[in-house]
């Protein structure tokens, strides 16, 4: 059962490998893979070794990890063509060239 949970978590992580931008390829994929593995382990431990708990933990972990990985990845290097301000008043680049 645990092998099935790990395999499903791996498939969920690999399914995100078709992302197109460098940011999505690195941060999102790595975050999703790490989150899926961690979530599967935690889900299995919390549910007493149940495959259903490991699968649910892997799916939740993959989604959460992908979101966090995408959010913390720096934008690609380039020169800023246009500056703007975010909701907190911080100066941010809105267009690269």
Image (cartoon, rainbow, N blue to C red):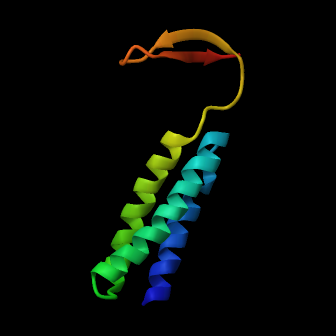
User: Is residue 42 positioned above or below 71 on the image?
Assistant: below
User: Is residue 29 positioned above or below 33 on the image?
Assistant: above
User: Is residue 46 positioned above or below 69 on the image?
Assistant: below
User: Is residue 21 positioned above or below 45 on the image?
Assistant: above
Report the quarter where the C terminus lies.
top right
Report the quarter where the N terminus lies.
bottom left
85 left or right of 75?
Answer: left
Residue 12 x, y percent position in the rendering: 50, 65
Residue 92 x, y percent position in the rendering: 52, 17
37 left or right of 79?
Answer: left
Residue 69 x, y percent position in the rendering: 51, 48
Count of numbered labels shown in the rendering: 0
Residue drawn at x 52%, y 44% is: 70
In the figure, residue 10 lies in which quadrant? bottom right
Residue drawn at x 34%, y 88% is: 49
Q: Residue furthest left?
A: 47
Residue 58 x, y percent position in the rendering: 41, 69
Residue drawn at x 47%, y 62% is: 35
Residue drawn at x 40%, y 65% is: 59
């Amino acid at each position: 059962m645990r092998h099935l949970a790990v395999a499903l978590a791996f498939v969920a992580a690999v399914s995100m490998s078709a992302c197109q931008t460098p940011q999505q390829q690195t941060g999102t994929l790595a975050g999703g893979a790490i989150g899926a593995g961690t979530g599967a382990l935690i889900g299995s431990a919390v549910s007493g070794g149940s495959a259903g708990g490991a699968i649910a933990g892997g799916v939740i972990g993959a989604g959460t990890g992908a979101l966090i990985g995408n959010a913390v990845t720096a934008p690609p290097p380039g020169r800023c063509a246009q500056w703007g301000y975010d909701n907190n008043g911080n100066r941010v680049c809105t267009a690269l060239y």
